[in-house]
Image (tube, rainbow, N blue to C red):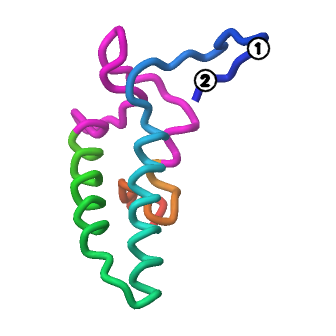
Amino acid sequence: MDARIGGMPVTPHAGKAVEINALWVNGLAAVAGLQERLGRDGGRIRALEATARSSFSRRFGAGGQLLDVVDGPGGHSTEMRPNQLLAICLPHAPLADPAVA
């Protein structure tokens, strides 16, 4: 999520950003939960969530460090940004942080 001033990115992030992927995992879990609460089968969405969750851990948790961006123009980014908190703080966060739980 790039901040822009006058149409120019102030904090450009090309590649796959951790916050977008964390929101995707959270969204899949939320939709599956809503389906289940309505008495519908959430199995298909739960399967997608499990795949996304596994992929998130494998791609963004490489080397025991939470990456900010993967597959960017310069490779993976190990910068620390507040948006990374979404990976552990969302209701259905893709990573479980024992310090937070």
Q: Is residue 71 magenta?
A: yes
Q: Position of residue 17 (x, y in %)?
A: 44, 31
The residue sitting at the bottom extreme is: 39
21 on left or right of 56:
right
Q: Quadrant of residue 96?
A: bottom left
* Marker disc for residue 2: 2
Q: Position of residue 46 (x, y in %)?
A: 28, 68
**Image position of 59 with respect to 41: above or below:** above
Q: Quadrant of residue 70?
A: top left
Q: What residue lies at 58% left-to-right and 37% top-to-bottom?
A: 82
Residue neighbourhood size for the residue with mark 2, other residues' Cα within 10 Å, grouped as few (<14), some (14–19), many (≥20): few
Q: Secondary structure at mark 2?
A: loop
40 on left or right of 43:
right
**Image position of 17 with respect to 3: above or below:** below
Q: Callout 1, which amino acid?
A: Ile
The residue sitting at the right extreme is: 6
Q: Is residue 24 magenta?
A: no
Q: Position of residue 7 (x, y in %)?
A: 72, 12
Q: Secondary structure at mark 1?
A: strand
Point out the image quarter for the C terminus: bottom left
Residue extent of the magenta highlight: 59-86
Q: What residue lies at 76% left-to-right and 14% top-to-bottom?
A: 5
The front one of 82 and 101 is: 82
76 on left or right of 21:
left
Measured in 3D between alpha carbons, the distance from the residue under mark 2 to the one under mark 1, in whole angstroms, is: 10 Å
Q: Position of residue 28 (x, y in %)?
A: 40, 61
Q: What residue lies at 40% left-to-right and 66% top-to-bottom?
A: 29
Q: Callout 2, which amino acid?
A: Asp
The front one of 96 and 46 is: 46
The residue that mark 1 highlights is 5
Point out the image quarter for the N terminus: top right
